[in-house]
Amino acid sequence: MVNRRRFLSIAATCAVMGSMPVRLALAASTPAVVPTVWKGSAMGALASMTLVHPDRTYAQSMIARCVAEIDRLESVFSLYRPDSALSRLNAAGELAEPPSELVELLSFSLSLAERSKGAFDPTVQPLLSLYFEHFATPGGSPAGPSAAAIAQARQRIGFADVEVDPRRIRLGRPGAAITLNGVAQGFVTDRVAELLLANGFGNVLIDLGEGRALGRRADGQPWRAAVADPARPDRTLFELTLGSDQGQSPALATSGGYGTRFGTDPLVHHLLDPHSGRSANHYGSVSVAAPRATLADGLSTTLSIVPPADRSALLADYPRARAWFVDNAGRVTGPDGERVIQA
């Protein structure tokens, strides 16, 4: 899946992870339990898991189970595996007996598409393919595909034509194709969190491109996250705690056009507005905290695309989600335009 290079840094213990500035690390006494940490890659992004558990052998075995589960879910959602369930759906236009995870995540995506009036649309894949093909062709305009090519691709886009049922998924339009890259990282993050929780791990931090926290760090302090300036990744804009305590959210996701740029113009990127066929450039980045990483992931993508005047109405449908908007000057505001105190 596309690596969107999230500008999200997560402090797992008193050590510094990712690009988080050193000043965000929290001093701590020697913890009673030494966390078990895994670092690798998942779905095209750098990934990590930190498990606080007294039995390190058990923790390591659970990390292996989690990595296997990530690989299994990639076989459902990946656009880069020709044998994945999603690739087979796109190739044939329909899929009988689809995996339950595909039914669940596509149903959520269609709901988000309806609530956002099509700003988020899982059938946008033909438009994304057009951009990738355009920029892979020598001599292609740095501004992107022509208006005629975009209009042709948009004829294959339309979430309302997708039929989802536990027994069958049907795309409806000739040449239609689905991408779940705007929500799949969050979904996989939630599944890993549920697997760990079901097996006795109540203090966990997961970063699979989206962050999800359970419980607390080994020293009893809350997990902390820092959101960086997309123009200056070494500069922290704001930070917050993650978890299930009062005033906290378990999950955090950040989206921005910096994640996948198609050419030399930074304004031409993967956050495509299905209505115009062009990249949405309302913000430098959008961060969303929510009870689940699936929702945080989907909303951060969607809020990057919806017109600013519509963002408060969309967030009203998800009252447990919070959002922060970063402009190109690094200023942070809330959904109603109020300034946010920065780090």
Image (tube, rainbow, N blue to C red):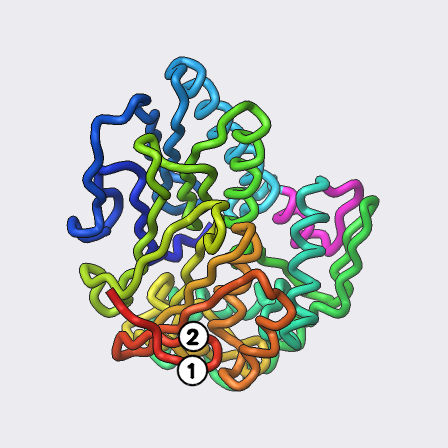
Q: To which residue does mark 2 refer?
A: 334
User: Which residue in the rendered view is the most extreme toward the front?
Assistant: 246
Q: What residue is rendered at 65% in x and 51% in y?
A: 105
Report if the CB atoms under discs 1 and 2 are less than 8 Å apart: yes
Q: What residue is rendered at 40% in x and 73% in y?
A: 325
Helix, strand or loop under label 2? loop
Where is residue 107 shown, x and y percent of the image? 71, 56
Q: Is residue 95 magenta?
A: yes
User: Which residue in the rendered view is the most extreme toward the left?
Assistant: 22
Towards the viewer: 273 or 149: 273
Q: Could you tell me the amino acid type at mark 1?
A: Gly
User: Which span of residues is magenta-colored?
Assistant: 85-98
Towards the viewer: 331 or 210: 331
Q: To which residue does mark 1 refer?
A: 337
* For residue 336, above or below residue 51: below
Q: Could you tell me the amino acid type at mark 2?
A: Gly
Towards the viewer: 124 or 129: 124
Where is residue 44 shown, x and y percent of the image? 41, 46
Helix, strand or loop under label 1? loop
